[in-house]
């Protein structure tokens, strides 16, 4: 394990250590020179262009759907340049350009650059309707996931697969490396706690690429009425689960760099509390705090930021807590920060809101925290489920 951790740290040191600024999706020339050697499924276009020639194409994409081997050319623009018949674009949470706030309604629209109809898969219509898929011969799914159960791009994957299966439309999944793909951890979602932030009985950190998860969804019969989607996975190359992966584009507005993505599984639980995790700053998911000086020496003041967080928790209030921006990039899921904030709050049951159990995928975590259990004992409660999941996961690994 020590050798694996050393390899992982070294991988991050040779990779780009920060993404683009909020206003710019392209990397600088220096960053491009240091970009990963991994080749994404999108970049392996010789593997899929022949499959879509002459067909009416629907594309499930956003700002992450780029060809890094071609100066970050967007996949839609690339296919149109190849005279492919792209007919519709379907977009997940955060929209086509990735600038909609978390939970913000994403509307249907017409893309100004291409003139293509853009159909929202976030809001009231999370599953593509029969009408929305009308005239489509084949779907392409290409979204950069971050390997965490409550990151909703995989929920969109589920509904796209289900709708495609019902309409007999094949799906090409252009796979990408998972930046949290080197481990598996956290409670496994329990029956009765399914929601859009948790659709599958998998742990918080699931250790799968979207291609691997798609195989699991099919193989375990998780789609409605146990239908199976006709999927083709274009694998990534020059990457495996032991390797770090630095994303060339922000996957969503509030995950601006590598450390935010590594801390995301640990800090996102604060969405189910009244603790700020830095929304409304330029360093979200890298700090946490509350408007009370007893929470820590570090301070920050959330502000409304267009394209990132319009109405952040504790807006315009000074929050005190901890700065995690210097946390090691080998960071893995922990309850340390959550337990620290809970103990300092003294709020007991009022510390949690109704969203917490959905994020946890169970009510056991909340009950264990209320009972005063230490992290070691809480972790012991999900070890059996994790072991069973690991066995299931092994059947679907591609890397």
Image (cartoon, rainbow, N blue to C red):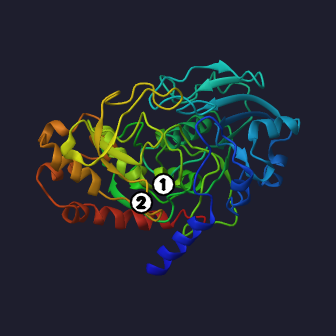
Q: How many marks?
A: 2
Mark 1 neighbour density, 10 Å: few (under 14) some (14–19) many (20 or more): many
Residue at 58% across / 67% down in the picture? 13
Mark 2 neighbour density, 10 Å: few (under 14) some (14–19) many (20 or more): few
Residue 193 visible at all: no
Locate residue 7, reporting x and y percent: 54, 75
Residue contact between numbered discs 1 and 2, judged by CB atoms under 8 Å = yes
Judged from the image, the secondary structure of the residue bearing numbered disc 1 is helix
Residue at 55% across / 48% down in the picture? 145
Residue at 66% across / 40% down in the picture? 25
Q: Using the image, tell me which numbered label, if any, was put on residue 190.
A: none
Q: In which quadrant of the rendered image does the N terminus lie? A: bottom left
Judged from the image, the secondary structure of the residue bearing numbered disc 2 is loop
Q: Is residue 227 left or right of residue 372?
A: right
Nearer-the-camera pick, 333 or 22: 22
Would you name the residue on which mark 2 appears?
Answer: 327
Would you name the residue on which mark 1 appears?
Answer: 259
Q: Quadrant of residue 285 in the image? A: top left
Locate residue 301, reporting x and y percent: 36, 34
Q: Is residue 189 left or right of residue 8?
A: left
Residue at 16% across / 47% down in the picture? 344
Locate residue 116, reporting x and y percent: 74, 24
Nearer-the-camera pick, 255 or 380: 255
Q: CA distance from mark 1 to mark 2?
A: 7 Å
Q: Quadrant of residue 89 in the image? A: top right
Residue 47 visible at all: yes
């Amino acid at each position: 394990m020590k050798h694996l951790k050393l390899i992982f740290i070294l991988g991050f040191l040779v990779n780009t250590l920060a993404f683009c600024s909020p206003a710019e999706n392209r990397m600088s020339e220096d960053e491009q020179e240091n970009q990963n050697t991994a080749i994404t499924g999108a970049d392996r276009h010789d593997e899929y262009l022949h499959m879509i020639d002459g067909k009416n194409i629907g594309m499930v994409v956003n700002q992450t759907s780029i060809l890094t081997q071609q100066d970050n050319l967007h996949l839609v623009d690339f296919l149109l340049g190849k005279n492919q018949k792209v007919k519709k674009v379907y977009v997940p949470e955060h929209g086509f350009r990735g600038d909609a706030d978390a939970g913000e309604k994403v509307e249907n629209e017409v893309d100004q650059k291409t003139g293509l109809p853009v159909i929202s898969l976030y809001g009231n219509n999370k599953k593509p309707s029969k009408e929305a898929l009308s005239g489509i011969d084949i779907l392409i799914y290409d979204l950069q996931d971050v390997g965490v159960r409550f990151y909703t791009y995989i929920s969109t994957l589920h509904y796209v697969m289900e709708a495609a299966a019902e309409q007999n439309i094949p799906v090409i999944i252009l796979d990408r490396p998972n930046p949290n793909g080197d481990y598996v951890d956290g409670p496994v979602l329990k029956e009765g706690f399914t929601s859009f932030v948790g659709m599958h009985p998998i742990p918080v950190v699931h250790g799968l690429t979207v291609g691997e998860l798609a195989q699991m969804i099919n193989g375990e019969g998780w789609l409605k009425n146990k239908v199976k989607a006709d999927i083709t996975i274009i694998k990534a190359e020059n990457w495996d689960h032991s390797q770090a992966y630095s994303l060339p584009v922000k996957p969503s507005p509030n995950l601006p760099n590598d450390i935010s993505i590594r801390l995301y599984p640990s800090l996102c639980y604060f969405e189910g509390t009244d603790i700020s995790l830095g929304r409304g700053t330029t360093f979200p998911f890298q700090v946490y705090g509350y408007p009370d000086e007893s929470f820590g020496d570090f301070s920050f003041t959330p502000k409304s930021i267009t394209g990132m967080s319009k109405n952040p928790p504790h807006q315009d209030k000074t929050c005190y807590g901890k700065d995690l921006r210097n946390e090691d990039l080998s960071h893995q899921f922990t309850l340390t920060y959550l337990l620290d904030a809970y103990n300092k709050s003294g709020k007991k049951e009022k510390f949690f809101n109704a969203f917490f159990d959905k994020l946890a995928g169970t009510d056991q975590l909340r009950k264990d925290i209320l009972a005063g259990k230490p992290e070691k004992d809480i972790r012991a409660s999900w070890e059996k489920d994790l072991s069973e999941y690991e066995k299931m996961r092994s059947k679907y690994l591609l890397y």
